Image (cartoon, rainbow, N blue to C red):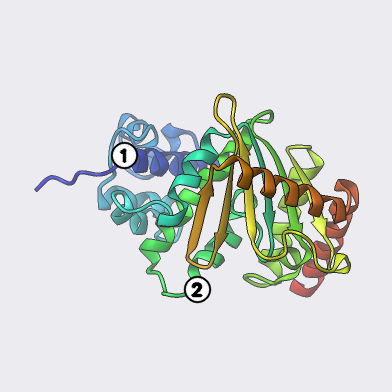
């Protein structure tokens, strides 16, 4: 029986392949020669038009030194890309022109590095297989690519101090993650505010929230908890969430002071890693 996979998943696979090839400093021609593939076939894979065979994926992993990533991702091409409760929010996220998010315990997905995201997705209950984890990882990294466009969406992130001090994956992983946030903030792609422990109780302390605005649709609010999440479109609820966000933002550090704090914590993690 022929394998039928999800075209969107093939595109995700191809984008990840292109990203890793470029990170390795290889052209399509160079990678195709080293992986014993035709350049045309490789181009079709990167464009999401062709599903790689197991042999293709094995050779790509070997040349790109990706530790079996592309082989493990193959079975997930027709699987669920995100948690069921996040599906609607993920689609809205791609359409949003403005995103304002509060993260209480973890760095939000849009800002996560690969190493940090891998650790998050490897943990928790129930345990995930390497294939399940890598499928979710590719999707999460794909989501971060909306930040490649400097102008849209406009992104603000309010991070509880716990999110930058909770050591996920070890000091080296945390140092890399925090420097990534600093880089996004310094080049003005994302506006960062930290809610310090000293602020005490604040209006968003009880859970994560993401506010989204659109060019032609009313704004929405997405609230998430353990194994659950809900998109709210009721105007009164959305306004209440916006007001709570604004209230908490008033208790947060400025963008400049927040980046200074994150730099300091990143340096502490670097020293610990050494």
Q: Residue under circle 1?
A: 37
Q: Residues within 10 Å of mark 1 (few under 14, many from 20)?
A: some
Res 263 → quadrant: bottom right
Query: Along the line of sight, which residue is nearer the eye, 76 or 158?
Result: 158
Q: Position of residue 20 (x, y in %)?
A: 50, 45
84 vs 32: above or below:
below
Is 102 positioned to the left or the right of 69 in the image? right
Provide residue 38's location: percent of width, then percent of height: 30, 34
Rounded to the nearest angstrom, the CA distance separating label 2 from label 1 is: 38 Å
**What SS does tag 1 mark?**
loop
Q: Residue furthest left?
A: 1
Residue receiving disc 2: 124
Quarter assignment of residue 136: bottom left
Q: Residue at x 78, y 67 (%)?
A: 270
Q: In the visual, does 27 lie left or right of 112? A: left
Which picture quadrant has residue 130?
bottom left
How far from the left and from the top, in percent, is residue 63? 43, 50
Residue occupying image coordinates x 29% and y 44%: 52
SS category of the residue bearing label 2: loop
Whether the residues at callouts 2 and 1 have beta carbons within 8 Å, the answer is: no
- Residue 110 appearing in the image: yes
Q: Nearer the viewer, residue 35 or 96?
A: 96
Disc 2 or disc 1, which is closer to the eye?
Answer: 2
Q: Earlier in the sequence, mark 2 or mark 1?
A: 1
């Amino acid at each position: 029986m022929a394998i039928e996979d999800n075209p969107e998943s093939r595109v995700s696979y191809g984008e990840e392949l292109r990203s890793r090839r470029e990170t390795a400093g290889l052209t399509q021609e160079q990678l195709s020669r080293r992986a014993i593939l035709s350049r045309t076939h490789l181009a079709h894979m990167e464009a999401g038009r062709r599903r790689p065979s197991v042999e293709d994926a094995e050779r790509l992993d070997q040349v790109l030194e990706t530790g079996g990533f592309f082989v493990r991702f193959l079975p997930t091409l027709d699987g669920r890309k995100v948690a069921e409760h996040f599906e609607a929010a993920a689609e809205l996220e791609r359409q949003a022109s403005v995103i304002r998010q509060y993260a209480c315990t973890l760095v939000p997905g849009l800002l996560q590095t690969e190493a940090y995201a891998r650790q998050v997705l490897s943990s928790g209950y129930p345990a995930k297989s390497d294939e399940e984890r890598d499928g979710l990882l590719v999707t999460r990294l794909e989501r971060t690519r909306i930040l490649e466009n400097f102008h849209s969406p406009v992104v603000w992130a309010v991070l509880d101090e716990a999110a930058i001090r909770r050591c996920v994956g070890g000091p080296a992983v945390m140092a890399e993650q925090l420097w990534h946030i600093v880089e996004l903030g310094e080049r003005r792609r994302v506006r960062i505010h930290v809610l310090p422990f000293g602020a005490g109780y604040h209006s968003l302390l009880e859970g994560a929230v993401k506010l989204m605005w659109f060019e032609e649709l009313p704004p929405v609010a997405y609230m998430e908890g353990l194994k659950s999440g809900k998109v709210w479109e009721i105007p009164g609820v959305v306004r209440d969430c916006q007001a709570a966000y604004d209230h908490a933002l008033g208790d947060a550090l400025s963008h400049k002071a927040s980046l200074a704090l994150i730099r300091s914590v990143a340096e502490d993690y670097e020293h610990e890693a050494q």
